[in-house]
Amino acid sequence: MLNVLVIDDEPAIRQVLSAVLTKAGHSVEQAANGMLGLERLAKGDVDVALCDISMPVMSGIDIIKQARSNGIDTSFIMITAYASVDTAIEAMKAGALDFMIKPLRNDELLHRLAQIADLRKLRDENSRLRSIVWGREEQAYRFICPAMQAIDRLISKVAPTDSTVLITGESGTGKGVVARTIHRQSRRAAGTFVNVNCGAIPENLLESEFFGHTKGAFTGADKARKGLFLEADKGTLFLDEIGELPLSLQTKLLHVIDDKHVRPVGSEQARRVDVRIIAATNRNLTNMVAEGRFREDLYFRISVFHIDLPPLRERREDIPGLIQRLLARNSRQPGMEQKITIDPEVEEIFLGYGWPGNMRELENVLDRAMILADDGRITLADLPPGITKTSRPADGKGPPSNTAGSLREQLRRMEWRIILRSLEEAGGNRKAAAEKLDVGLSSLYRKLEEFEQLGWPLGQGGENGQDHVP
C-alpha cells in the first residue's frame, strides 16, 4: 500500500479522496495549499501526491517544480477541472507522472495508484539485484541424514503458510539458507527477501533502520528512509541473530508484528505492512527469557514454528554430497572454470574433522583449497594446518583423519569411506548399496556393526529409515 498526500484547496475534494483511498488500504494525509504540501513532502516519505493544478498562491505546477528542485522523488498525479493539452504537457515536463480530469472516477484512480505501486516495487527490487550470480543461491539438495530429511519436511510444511518461524543452531549451520528456502517455497516468493543482521546495526540507529525515518527526523537524516519493514512489504523479513536486539526494540518489534503497522521516526502517520517474519539465532533464547534479557511474549510470538539445525559433526553422512555440490558451484566462479577433483585422503580428513564452524567453515576451506589446487586437484597440501593436524573429531565419532597406521587400519578407513559413499549414492537404502558394492546384505550389516563399535557412524539406512536383515 502507498503513502498518499492529497493537496487541494477544496475541503470536500480532500475529504472524498481521503475516504476512497483509506478504504482501499492506503495511508492518506491532506494539505490545504501548496506551502503545506511542500512542508509535508519535505519529510521524504510520501509515495504519491494527488495535486490540484489550480490553487491560490502556489499552483500545482509550481509545487512539483519546487519538489523536484529539492530532490523529492514522490510520484505526482496532477488533477484539474479543466481539460487542457497545454496544461497536461506543462505538468509532464515539470515531472508529473500522470494527469487526471475532475471529477475523478474512483476505479480509475485506484487502478493508476496500483500501477504506480507496481512500478515502485519493481524499481526497488531491480536496485538490489535480487538474483545472486555464479550459483550462490542455494540449490535443492537431497540429504541422507535423517535429521536433515526431517528438517526438509518441516520446511515444506511451513513455507506455504504465513507463520513466523524461529531457526536455531550453531553459527554456520545454514540458518540463512533455510530462511531463503522457506521464502522461495512460499506464496511470497515474488516479493522481496530482506536479510538483516540484528547484531550489526548500532543501537542508536535500530529504530530508524527497522521502521524508517522522515527527512530531518534527527541529525544526519538528510533524506527519508523507508526502513526494513516497508522494504519487505509483501515479502519476507529475515531477522538474523535476533537475540542481539535490545529490550527497548523488542517491545516495538512485538507491537509491529501484532499490529502490522509501522510509524517512521519523525512521522505522525502509521503505515500498514504485510511482512512475514523469520528469525534466527545461535543463542539460547529460553535462558535469555529466564534471565530477563529477552521478552517472553516476543519469544512466544516468533517461535510459533521452531526449526533447530544440527551441527555438521552430527550429520557426517551428508559431507561427501555437500563437498561435491560446493565444488560444482564454486567452479563456476571467475578464474575457476576447470573441473575440480578431490583426493580420497582429503575427503577422509573432511569426514573425520569436527567442523566447529559447520557449513561456513567447510565452504571457506574448500574455497581456499580450490585457489591453491594445482591441475584442478585438491590434495592434503592445500588444506589449512589446523585441519590436517586433527586426528579425530572432538566428539570421538568417525575414523582417525590421518593416513598413518598399519595396512589393515588404513584399509579399514578406506572401506568405511567407500561404504559411506555408496550409502549416500543409494539415498540411504542399504539393500541398494549392497548391490552396488556387489556384497551380500548380511555382509554389509556386519561391516556396519563393526564400524558402529569403532564409533564410526554411517547414519540410518533403508528406504523408510528402517532396514531388516532378511
Image (cartoon, helix red, strand yellow):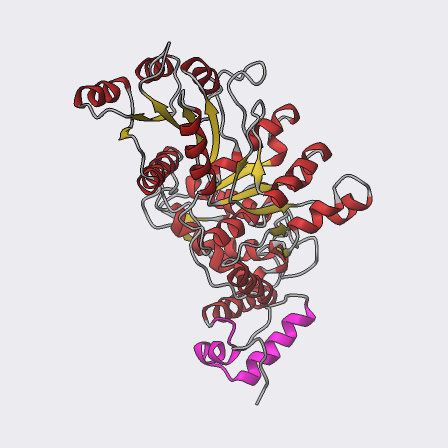
The answer to whether residue 120 shows anywhere in this view is: yes
Q: Main secondary structure of the magenta part?
A: helix
Question: Split into 4 quadrants, where in the image is the N terminus?
Answer: top left
Q: Foreground residue, 439 or 127? A: 127
Q: Foreground residue, 399 or 362? A: 362
Return the residue found at the far right.
291
Return the residue found at the far front.
12
In the figure, is residue 467 to the left or right of 374?
A: right
Q: Foreground residue, 324 or 294? A: 294
Q: Position of residue 46 (x, y in %)?
A: 44, 26
- Report the span colored magenta: 427-454
* Quarter of the view holding residue 444: bottom right
Q: Position of residue 108 (x, y in %)?
A: 30, 40
The answer to whether residue 335 shows anywhere in this view is: no
Q: Is residue 121 above or below residue 380?
A: above
User: For the point 48% across and 56% down, which residue is it?
Assistant: 322
Q: Position of residue 53 (x, y in %)?
A: 31, 20
Q: Is residue 408 above or below residue 275?
A: below
User: For the point 28% across and 30% down, which residue is it?
Assistant: 100
Q: Is residue 249 above or below residue 9?
A: below
Query: Within the magenta stretch, is there residue 159?
Result: no
